[in-house]
Amino acid sequence: MNNNQFGWTNERQEEWKQYQTTEWIPGRVILEHKRMYRVMTSAGELLSEVSGKLDFEAIDRVDYPAVGDWVAVSARVDEGKAIIHKVLNRTSQFSRKAAGGTYEEQLVAVNVDTLIIVTALTKDFNPRRIERYVLLAYESGTSPVVVLSKLDLCSDPESSVQEVTAACPGVPIHALSSVTGEGMDQLSVYLTEGRTVALLGSSGAGKSSITNALMDEQVQKVNETRVTDDRGKHTTTHRELFWLPNGAGIIDTPGMREIQLLGADVGIEQSYEDIYKLAEACRFNDCQHKQEPGCRVQEAIETGELSEQRFRGYLKLLREQAYAQRQVDKRAMIQEKKRWKKITKSSRR
Ligand SMILES: Nc1nc2c(ncn2[C@@H]2O[C@H](COP(=O)(O)OP(=O)(O)OP(=O)(O)O)[C@@H](O)[C@H]2O)c(=O)[nH]1
Ligand SMILES: [Zn+2]
């Protein structure tokens, strides 16, 4: 592997020394699909599975390869296949953990140099959410950058930029539009040879559109059900690592809302167990804890047993969750409609 190729570094070369006596070669995972991995190697792209040993020794999902991982494979080049034997050390690991740990940790992107948090400058704009992503990015060992997308749809981007600056001091913020191209050049500093960026953000924030604009070709189908084409290329229901002509890597991740939502119910109930407990004693089953008679929650706030601020935090999280659920539902409905359109079209032929 040449230095800088697909992000291979001197440190990797050093780490690789332990495998020099094997017939293994290094490769980088660029696509994951149901325990099958597409791995980029100096011998080309190889369709790979994990070895029986790796599978046996893996305790949970984080022990398996993820998109962005460097792995050691034994290659059957003529068949275009390989077996993954080892996952090399991760320099960064961005994952979603459900609060309380009921759900498994999900790897979103690993070995990423810059995490680009994408939020549209539209109704979707939410500095609190950006702040949360930024915290997660720091925890994962990557540098966060905030991109405010769809600049062409916003009449007052400056106030949004200011809000994000206040919420995330010290984090670079770039407003841009992938449609007009305005501001896109700001991203070039992160996209240099051998560096890997990951785009992260809600569904519809414009991640695929940005990837497309950067790739200068339609690699990620925008806003359609993402399916595999004949040659098994470019699926985007899954994370995928693309290479720019200049040797920089981009990981486009599917919208985070669904991922966040996975653990949200449990998360809220566990983090606000006290409120749930109190609510059980409310007179009405469907008490909204506003002005209802016999509301145990309001009573607890009055006596100081429960802080007002904590209750507000709880309400806020509920609202966000309801909003997220509506978005997911809306999206599912659109997909369903599209599917029907396709079916009725093809049956007319
Ligand atoms: N006007 C305008 N529309 C945009 C821009 N970027 C994206 N869009 C539109 O916003 C919608 C969503 O864009 P995508 O790029 O698919 O969003 P995404 O973040 O990749 O969404 P997921 O793949 O579902 O996570 C599409 O209809 C795009 O055409 C922009 O800069 N300006
Ligand atoms: Zn109540």
Image (cartoon, helix red, strand yellow):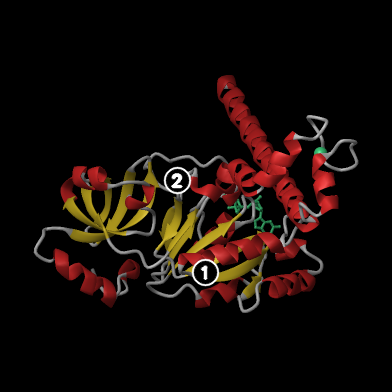
The residue at which mark 1 appears reads as: 138
Q: Nearer the viewer, residue 61 or 152?
A: 61
Q: Residue at x 61, y 48 (%)?
A: 257
User: For the residue carrying disc 1, how many other residues have a C-alpha within 10 Å: few (<14), some (14-19), or many (20+)?
Assistant: some
Question: Which quadrant would the C terminus be assigned to in this image?
Answer: top right
Q: Residue furthest left?
A: 21
Q: Is residue 193 left or right of residue 274?
A: left
Quarter of the image where one finds residue 104: top left
Tag of residue 219: none
Looking at the rendering, the quadrant in which ligand 1 lies is: bottom right
Q: Is residue 206 left or right of residue 42?
A: right
Question: Which quadrant would the N terminus be assigned to in this image?
Answer: bottom left
The residue at which mark 2 appears reads as: 104
Q: Secondary structure at mark 2?
A: loop
Q: Residue flagged by tag 1: what amino acid is it?
A: Tyr
Examine the rendering and report whether any part of residue 178 can be seen. Answer: no
Q: Nearer the viewer, residue 181 or 131?
A: 131
